[in-house]
């Protein structure tokens, strides 16, 4: 942008089972359940190139409409299964891609950067589930549409406890820090399957088959929206079976930079040391701490 098991060890951490209160998944004292939606743009139906991804692109305004349509489809699918309080975190580019006047007026929207929890700003332990819309695969995933991790311009990748993570896996772990499971993910096939490695009961909508970094076989926006709505309606019926994905703490972080001078400067930060020309590593308390650090590392001015 993914038969119930007791414990599954995967990648950088584990899915940890634990009791879930009925109120969290069904709403407390008559209040509807709370669902958190994180939306990116690279995994939206029809999006394949920079022409759709930024204000200078000739199709960016259309892509904003497609993105908003998929968010609204997700909201409709969630509410097809019952009332829900929904927070949407606009997580692409400058955090202002969603057309907020086209979203239901009772939905809260997180906009703009910087913010402490990045693509997951606004999540806490009161949410029943997290939903990822428009996600993409990681930097090191061959043939993924617009594959990158956190910064396509600056980073070669991110490893947690020795395992490379996509933004979807990273954000699943960040949700897991608060005890929130991932219920659904949409994007290209590689993005969806990466998240489902750590959230095996999560439903998914594969809206495009990737051919490469800038090409895919995509469904139409209307078809993608229908797939997302149907998938979310199914996903809401499984909330009580979902388990959060948690990484072991403290967290061994390794960050790769495309420019060696960025790795050089990153190593000036206390707690980080250079492991080679392109990489720095260190150990940190938890994922919120790592998330704040990554925002600093990716905001360094270009030399």
Image (cartoon, rainbow, N blue to C red):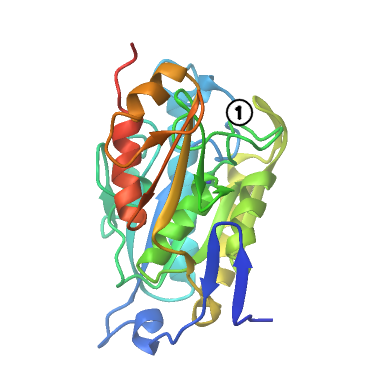
Query: In which quadrant of the rendered view does residue 209 lie?
Result: top right
Residue in front for this viewpoint, 109 or 195: 195
According to the picture, the residue beneath numbered tag 1 turns out to be 48
Quarter occupied by the C terminus: top left
Rendered view: 69 above or below 9: above
Q: Is residue 230 left or right of residue 252?
A: right
What element does badge 1 sit on?
loop
User: Percent x, y for residue 127?
Assistant: 34, 70
Query: In which quadrant of the rendered view does residue 25 lie?
Result: bottom left
Residue in front for this viewpoint, 30 or 242: 242
User: Percent x, y for residue 99?
Assistant: 34, 39
Rendered view: 208 above or below 243: above
Residue 191 appears in the figure = yes
User: Percent x, y for residue 69?
Assistant: 47, 45
Rendered view: 248 above or below 28: above
Residue in view at x 38 percent, y 31 percent:
93
How busy is the neighbourhood of tag 1: few (under 14 within 10 Å), some, or many (20 plus)?
Answer: many
Query: In which quadrant of the rendered view does residue 203 lie?
Result: bottom right
Residue in front for this viewpoint, 277 or 91: 277
């Amino acid at each position: 942008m993914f038969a119930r098991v007791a414990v599954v060890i995967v990648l950088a951490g584990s899915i940890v089972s634990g009791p879930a209160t009925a109120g969290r998944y069904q709403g407390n004292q008559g209040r509807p359940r709370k669902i958190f939606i994180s939306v990116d743009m690279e995994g939206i139906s029809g999006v394949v190139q920079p022409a759709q991804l930024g204000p200078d692109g000739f199709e960016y305004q259309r892509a904003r409409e497609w993105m908003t349509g998929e968010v609204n489809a997700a909201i409709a699918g969630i509410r097809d299964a019952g009332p829900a309080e929904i927070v949407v975190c606009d997580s692409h580019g400058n955090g202002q891609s969603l057309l907020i006047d086209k979203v239901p007026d009772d939905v809260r929207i997180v906009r703009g950067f910087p913010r402490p929890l990045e693509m997951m700003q606004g999540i806490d332990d009161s949410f029943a589930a997290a939903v990822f819309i428009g996600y993409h695969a990681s930097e090191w995933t061959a043939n993924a549409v617009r594959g990158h991790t956190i910064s396509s311009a600056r980073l070669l990748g991110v490893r947690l406890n020795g395992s490379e993570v996509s933004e979807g896996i990273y954000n699943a772990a960040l949700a897991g820090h608060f005890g929130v499971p991932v219920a659904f993910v949409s994007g290209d096939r590689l993005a969806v399957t990466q998240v489902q490695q750590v959230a095996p009961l999560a439903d998914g909508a594969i809206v495009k088959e990737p051919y490469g970094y800038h090409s895919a076989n995509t469904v139409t926006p209307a078809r993608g929206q229908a797939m997302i709505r149907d998938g979310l309606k199914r996903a809401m019926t499984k909330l009580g079976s979902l388990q959060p994905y948690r990484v072991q703490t403290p967290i061994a972080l390794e960050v790769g930079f495309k420019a060696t001078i960025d790795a050089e400067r990153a190593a000036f930060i206390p707690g980080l040391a250079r492991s080679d020309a392109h990489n720095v590593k260190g150990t940190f308390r938890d994922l919120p701490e790592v998330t704040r650090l990554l925002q600093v590392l990716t905001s360094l001015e270009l030399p």
